[in-house]
Image (tube, rainbow, N blue to C red):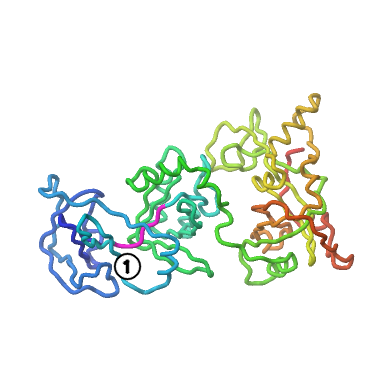
Amino acid sequence: MLLIDEEGTVIQGYVPSGRVGTYEQTSGSVYKLSNFFGSRNKAQYRVTDHSATATFAWNSELSVLHNPPVPVPEDRFRFHSYEEFQANCDRKVDLYDYIFTSNDYTPMKYFIPYYVGHMKLVNGQTITDHTVLDEAGIAEKRHLCVHVQTHDGPVMKLYLWDKAASDFCEKFKSYGSTPSVLLVTTVNPKHLGGTLALTSMASSRVFMDTDVQPSKDYLGWLRSNSDIANKINAEVVTKPETATLEELFSYIKQATAKVAWFECTATIDDVIQGSAWYYISCDGCNSKAFKGPTSLICNNNKCGKSEVTGVAQYLTRISVYDKSEQAVYVILGDAGKELTGKHASELVASYFESNEGVEADHCVPVPQALLDTIGQTHRFIVKVSDHNLTGKTQTITVTKIFPPEAPHPIAPLGEDAIPATSDDILKTGSEESDACK
């Protein structure tokens, strides 16, 4: 642990493994430590530049001072930028840093590094007003992954392990509404899979929206700069590898392939018809909603919404091709708006307004806004999911679509180069919607 006195001096405290858990501590309290002895710093646990350590003995006492005679400085946070994390990644150095405070620039040493930002994804789940955590799955895996972005900087993956993960879940649930800001202390920058990421350590602590002043300050910035904060798409966290459709299918066939994101440039040659191009979702968690005896019911048991309002969401399959292959993409949610410029709910409402005599369960035909995309060339961010790797479906999920490129001719595939028609690919398995049933 780190001990700081009224003069701002920081020294390492060491508790032998047999006495861990003996000393209960409360955040914000000041303590009196007696019956300890000094020893040399243990190099493998060193967290300050002092050579000495205050080591707890069998008779050490840690008692609360309710009215301390001298005020002890509050916690100070030294936040690091993406570039600083990158520069210090995978370096086996002492985990301390200098912060210069007061007019005489006295160096104050604190455990590094701290990271604060707004959450974009939790275990791949987009942050919404009704985000529900899979606590059982997190407990089983003993960790979770949060995608966090600081101001308008890069989005970084933060892996929280064991107690840090359970603390995250507890704090996340304690808020009346879904929290937005995450501050985490003592994280370790590492390269995981070639990407810079942050991982928690045994001493890591997590704070959210209004827990401490720095998180409050960031929350204030976030509320005033929501346009900047939302500018970077959460699912494009690291730059996806560019691939052709042929390379994409080749990757899926590899025995060692894992869930991954790719950037593919392709031309739309058809919008698949014969099945619904949208589905009705829960307005809280975007899961599929189905008809109950008297109202709609969310298909997600963990959602918690008793009164569900149905919202039309894209579930559109398009046929695309490039110079190497042909594929079927499925466009979900916000990706559909990026393609057409309109929400699915807007297109559905427009159809019923123009066809007043049509019943509510009528199957809405594919709108012209989707048909107009045929012939357009886009850069697609696609996700190779578990369904693709297990062979349940060859349909590729699109997570983001960039604006169409300037028109340029792309030679069509030769007849013998097309392995199957779009209908054949869809029959291999995909998520069906009963929005029109």
Rendered-image quadrant of the N terminus = bottom left
Write the residue at 55% across / 54% down: 124
In this rendering, position of residue 285 left or right of residue 93: right
Question: Which residues are the magenta region?
Answer: 111-116
Task: Say whether residue 364 is visible.
Answer: yes
Write the residue at 27% across / 70% down: 46
Badge 1 amino acid: Leu
Write the residue at 34% across / 48% down: 214
Residue 23 falls in which quadrant of the image?
Answer: bottom left
Q: Secondary structure at mark 1?
A: loop
Rendered-image quadrant of the C terminus = top right
In this rendering, position of residue 263 left or right of residue 186: right
Give the labeled residue for mark 1: 95
Within the magenta stretch, is there residue 250?
no
| Number of numbered labels in the structure image | 1
Write the residue at 63% across / 66% down: 241
Along the viewing direction, whichever of 339 and 304 lies nearer the viewer: 339
